[in-house]
Amino acid sequence: MTPRRQLVKHSLLRDEIRDVIQNAILSKELKPGDRIVETQLAADLGVSKVLVREATRELEAIGLLENKPFQGSYACIITAKGSVFNFRTALLLIHPICILYTL
């Protein structure tokens, strides 16, 4: 039997970019209605626009960003009563805390 090796989780750069945008929205650094300028964000983070676009698509899928065709992505309003706040968003809010408790 071979000895067990503990796997090291490697995060994707896209996931790190998504986390940066998500944290900016949740901390209200990005206010509802603020536009995400892909070229500016890519330059600030030193990554390609493609990675920023992939990250914004993920955040649009869970309702933290809204894509307006030919205009860009915008931060959404997050309220408990609004249509944007859903179970998946709630899980995203508590996910980092859960990870801390499992370490």
Image: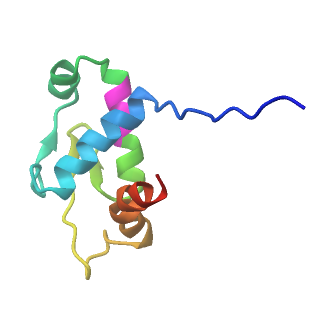
Q: Residue, x 11% and y 48% (percent of image)?
A: 34
Q: Is residue 40 above or below residue 102?
A: above
Which of the 4 image quarters holds residue 53?
Answer: top left
- Residue 31, given in percent of the width and then of the height, sits at 9, 55
On the question of residue 62 being in view, the answer is yes
Q: Main secondary structure of the magenta part?
A: helix
Quick check: is 102 in the magenta stretch? Answer: no
Relative depth, front residue between 60 and 10: 10
- Residue 101, given in percent of the width and then of the height, sits at 42, 60
Quick check: is 55 in the magenta stretch? Answer: yes
Q: Is residue 30 above or below residue 81?
A: above
- Residue 56, given in percent of the width and then of the height, sits at 33, 40
Q: State how many labels appear.
A: 0
Q: Residue, x 15% and y 23% (percent of image)?
A: 44
Q: Which residues are magenta?
A: 51-56
Which of the 4 image quarters holds residue 2?
Answer: top right
Relative depth, front residue between 29 and 7: 7
Q: Quadrant of the N terminus?
A: top right
